[in-house]
Amino acid sequence: MVFRVLDATAFYAGIPFVSNDSFMTTNTVYDEIQHIKRKQGALEMLQQTGRLQIRDPSKDSINVVRDAAERTGDSVTISEQDVSIIALALENKIGLITDDFAVTNIAKQLKIKTDSLMTQGINTVGKWISYCSICGKEFSKEKECPICGNKLNRKLIKKSI
Ligand SMILES: [Zn+2]
């Protein structure tokens, strides 16, 4: 079975639920997407059938990714979650599905194959926003919540047409 690594956006876009492929992700991503309540049954099913594996990369792989991020100048923009999925792809020598520019950039540096959501037949017309999971407020450029200092999460918002 060929696996590919998914980031949180790929889950939000529904990739694993519309595809017959097999996927891997890390615990930090899985923790974030757990709240997609209406998909919980589907997430369990994917895990029971072995089509979704939750694994965490080794410290060594994480360090390799952090070094690469330093080289590409992306070290300030990427989150722990981003680092974890790149490291997981690196460690298992598999591709990565992501629309995140910094993630794609670092993956390229490490010769990891990346696919955007678009090439998966998913048209992500939307924009990225950062939000604070504590205050529930949305921000555009900040990495940390200006109100409480919590690290912001990112999500893709569909544009209303
Ligand atoms: Zn906050």
Image (cartoon, rainbow, N blue to C red):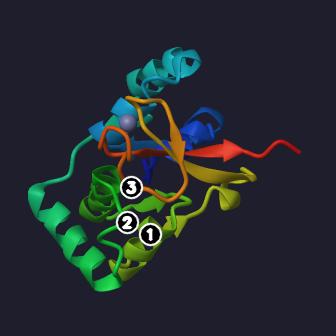
Q: Amino acid at mark 1?
A: Ala
Q: Give the percent coordinates (x, y) of residue 49.
A: 43, 25
User: In the image, 85: left or right of 138?
Assistant: left
Nearer the N terminus, badge 3 or badge 1?
1
Inter-mark Cα distance, 3 to 1: 14 Å
Residue found farthest to the right = 161
Q: Which residue is mark 2?
A: 77
Tell which tag, 1 or 2, sits nearer the viewer.
2
Q: Quadrant of residue 66?
A: bottom left
- Quadrant observed for ligand 1 in the rendered image: top left
Q: Is residue 155 visible?
A: yes
User: In the image, 89: left or right of 102?
Assistant: left
Q: Give the percent coordinates (x, y) of residue 128.
A: 59, 53
Q: Give the percent coordinates (x, y) of residue 138.
A: 54, 41
Nearer the N terminus, badge 3 or badge 2?
2
Graded by Cα atoms within 10 Å as few (under 14), some (14 to 19) or many (20 or more), the crowding at tag 3 reads: many
Q: Amino acid at mark 2?
A: Thr
Graded by Cα atoms within 10 Å as few (under 14), some (14 to 19) or many (20 or more), the crowding at tag 2 reads: few
Q: Give the percent coordinates (x, y) of residue 114.
A: 50, 67
User: In the image, 37: left or right of 84?
Assistant: right
Q: Which residue is mark 1?
A: 102
Q: Secondary structure at mark 1?
A: helix
Tell which tag, 3 or 1, sits nearer the viewer.
3
Q: Residue at x 60, y 42 (%)?
A: 15
Tell which tag, 3 or 2, sits nearer the viewer.
3
Q: Quadrant of residue 29?
A: top left
Q: Secondary structure at mark 2?
A: loop
Q: Residue at x 38, y 61 (%)?
A: 94
Q: Which residue is mark 3?
A: 143
User: In the image, 108: left or right of 67?
Assistant: right
